[in-house]
Amino acid sequence: MADVLAAASRVADRYSRKADDDRPLRGYLTLIGAYGSTVAGLTGLAAALGRKPPRTVSAGDVALLTAATYKLSRILTKDAIASPLRAPFTQFQEPAGEGEVNEEPTHHDPLRHAAGELVNCPFCVSMWVATGFAAGLVFVPGFTRLAATALTAVAGSDMLHFAFTAVREKV
């Protein structure tokens, strides 16, 4: 085991040599393990309950879940209102406009730093959100579509707000 840890330490050192700070590879690995364990747990629960994934997923569901994943990822990672959820791992940097904020990870502990990067990155969180929606289609498809519809409506509303603002500024 000591040889494995020493080899992992050498890999981490080599990997982060050109980085401004130490890359939290141990934290990333822990989060990857948590994600994989979550997917395995959901798969096991579905099997135990006799729930099967849909044979096909319609293009409409893909479009609906894509827009909902986008919006929920933005809410979780950038909305000022969701800041208390990110605060244990991030620090406020500046307003980003339209109710959003920019934050950065605050901790040097590899796991807390990696968590700070995760909860601050809509692209990163979208994988977790999309997985939640996919599980929702297996366990509670009606509720999942309803929640996704509401989030998609909010995303559409955001686009209309931006369009209105752009038109108003030109007039």
Image: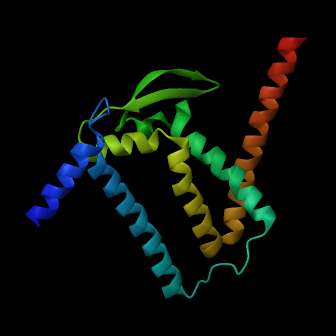
On-image quarter of the C terminus:
top right
How many marks on residues?
A: 0
Q: Position of residue 22 (x, y in %)?
A: 26, 37
Nearer the observer, 84 or 131: 131
Tell which residue pokes out farthest to the left in this image.
2
Q: Is residue 82 left or right of residue 10?
A: right
Residue 20 occupies quadrant: top left
| Residue located 53% across and 20% down the image | 95
According to the image, what is the colour scheme of the structure? rainbow
Q: Is residue 98 left or right of residue 114?
A: right
Position of 157 relative to 58 (above/below): above
Q: Position of residue 146 (x, y in %)?
A: 73, 60
Position of 164 relative to 131 (above/below): above
Q: Is residue 50 left or right of residue 165?
A: left
Q: Position of residue 134 (x, y in %)?
A: 61, 66
| Residue located 35% across and 63% down the image | 33
| Residue located 56% across and 62% down the image | 132
Q: Position of residue 31 (x, y in %)?
A: 36, 55
Position of 36 relative to 86 (above/below): below
| Residue located 76% across and 57% down the image | 63
Q: Is residue 64 left or right of residue 16?
A: right
On-image quarter of the N terminus:
bottom left
